[in-house]
Amino acid sequence: MSERLYIFDTTLRDGEQVPGCQLNTTEKIEVAKLLESLGVDVIEAGFPISSPGDFNSVLEISKAVSEPTICALTRAVKKDIDVAADALRLAKRKRIHTGIGVSPQHIYDKLRSTPEKIVESAVEAVKYAKRYVEDVEFYAEDAGRADVEYLARVVEAVIKAGATVVNIPDTTGYCLPNEYGAKIKYLVDNVPNIGRAIISTHCHNDLGMATANTLSGILNGARQAEVTINGIGERAGNTSLEEVVMTLRCHKDVAIDTNINSRLITKASHLVSSLMNMPVQPNKAIVGRNAFAHSSGIHQDGVLKQRQTYEIIDPQDIGLNE
């Protein structure tokens, strides 16, 4: 039997941070309902304190969908957490996602702080969020560039404070897959209370390795993956939902799977692309229009004789009816 990987979709939060691609609340609800049908476990619906629009979207999405957990992002700031809790008040299942930077670049340059004060702020934020919700996720921002021993110290402290999920983001897309996987494995092996929380991946695609890093994290013990439809997001984007899901489906020997209804992947891809006016590049894995096209005569001959010669995915498995 396959182990379960939870899919945390942040299309409506991190994905929507693409300049010029913002959605109104009605459009966000349309996407959220399709994400629910798709089978995602968590929908990160917004960053409530950032704008009245984000607050309202989290509130309305909480009313519109019932199966997935609805998640709201905050900084490690009490006011952020208060506002997020208010926005989530109607959600059937709710999660507050709070955190702070843990790399030297964030601790010293951005936050003008010290490692000790960061741990204190992290613990305080988790404890404060725990007053409102049972399910608290902590993000260790820029964990990809953080010292791994310090990262382990932060993770142990926030789990002790009540975090149910610990998010280890490669915020800048800096890591190599072996580095990122090793970081997750270090936490599994060296954080005494790690069994009380789920480790989550959140990888950016600045160097084109978001999916590879995410899968390396999963193979080393992460059991939640933070993803977006079509891999959209700031700068070069986030890890692509469809790439993670279909990679695990293709590699059945890995014995880790999701609850995603893959036959809705193409529909979800088209909806997000259309609403955000963001065309999918033709050679995009899984959902690009050339993903199942064959121009080489040798390839065409092979596919006509036996599809599996050059196609490792049946197009119908992602809802593509040729």
Image (spheres, grey):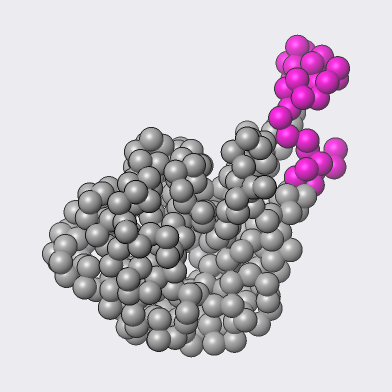
**Magenta run includes residue 277:** no
Residue 284 at x, y percent in the picture: 61, 38
Q: Quadrant of the C terminus?
A: top right
Question: From the viewer's perspective, is residue 114 above or below residue 171?
Answer: below
Residue 255 at x, y percent in the picture: 62, 42
> Is residue 52 in view?
no
**Magenta residues?**
294-322
Give the residue drawn at x 49%, y 46%: 218
Give the residue drawn at x 34%, y 83%: 128
Compared across the picture, whether 179 is left or right of 314 comes to left
- Outermost residue toward the top? 298
How many dots with numbers?
Answer: 0
Give the residue drawn at x 85%, y 42%: 321
**Magenta run includes residue 296:** yes
Question: From the viewer's perspective, is residue 63 above or below residue 119?
Answer: below
**Residue 195's quadrant in the figure?**
bottom left
> Is residue 63 in view?
yes
**Residue 299's quadrant in the figure?**
top right
